[in-house]
Amino acid sequence: MINEAQKADEPSLVGRLYFVMNLYAGDVLEGAARRVGVSQANSSRWAHAWNDAGVDGLRPSFGGRPPPKLSDMQFAELCKILKEGQPWTPRAIHTLIEDRYGVTYDSAHLSRKLRESGMHYVIKPRPMDPRSPENADEILAERLAKALGEEYEKADEQEDDPVVLGFFR
């Protein structure tokens, strides 16, 4: 049976048949599982499948990968939209996909799919932190004056560009 499974290019079935062979050779479930490199849960499931249906019970029954959430045409349309409306934040891309196509993607998977299609997230630097107050320079000058005392105020009057050695909280 193992030779037939190898000729038919069924590597999953070959491993499961070796597991059964190890059981018939005298191994307990844990030992047979360890020899083929599977978990205790899988070994128990395989033993039940063998007892219930023989070789056919050991054949994998999954049908492969699930179908993609977006068709090739939809994904091409998405890429076109993203190229035309740049720049996009990751959150905005997720919202677009959910609103337009009614599906959600894991962030890592979506970024991988976009990279494979030649697109990359780009970090766009902000000229200023939007949370900072408008009078941030004045606040900094006041805090430095308080922290450094009179010497700073005198130096500030004498020089246009004083040297600041550190930041204080």
Image (cartoon, helix red, strand yellow):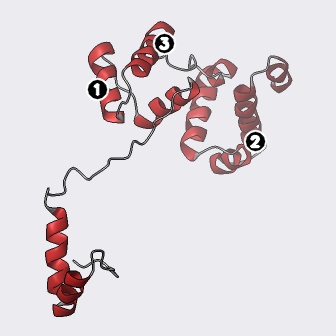
Q: Is 143 rendered above or below residue 95?
A: below
Q: Which residue is mark 2?
A: 22
The C terminus appears in which quarter of the rendering?
Answer: bottom left
Q: Residue at x 17, y 86 (%)?
A: 153
- Image quarter of residue 99: top left
Mark 1 lies on residue: 95
Which residue is tagged 3?
76
Q: Does residue 45 appear left or right of residue 2 in this picture? A: left
Residue 41 picture location, percent across and down: 53, 42
**Foreground mark, 1 or 2?**
1
Mark 2 or 3: the one toward you: 3
Q: Is residue 61 left or right of residue 144?
A: right
Q: CA distance from mark 1 to mark 2?
A: 52 Å
Residue at 66% x, 18% y: name it.
Answer: 56
Helix, strand or loop at mark 2: helix
Disc 3 residue crowd, few under 14, some 14–19, many 20+, Cα 10 Å: few
Q: Nearer the viewer, residue 95 or 54?
A: 95
Distance CA(mark 3)–CA(mark 1): 17 Å
Give residue 152's position: percent from left, percent from top.
22, 87
- Percent from the top left, x then y, of residue 10? 74, 22
Residue 130 locus on image (x, y percent): 21, 49
Kind of residue at badge 2: Asn
Return the disc, 3 or 1, that comes first in the chain's sequence. Answer: 3
Mark nearer the N terminus (1 vs 2): 2
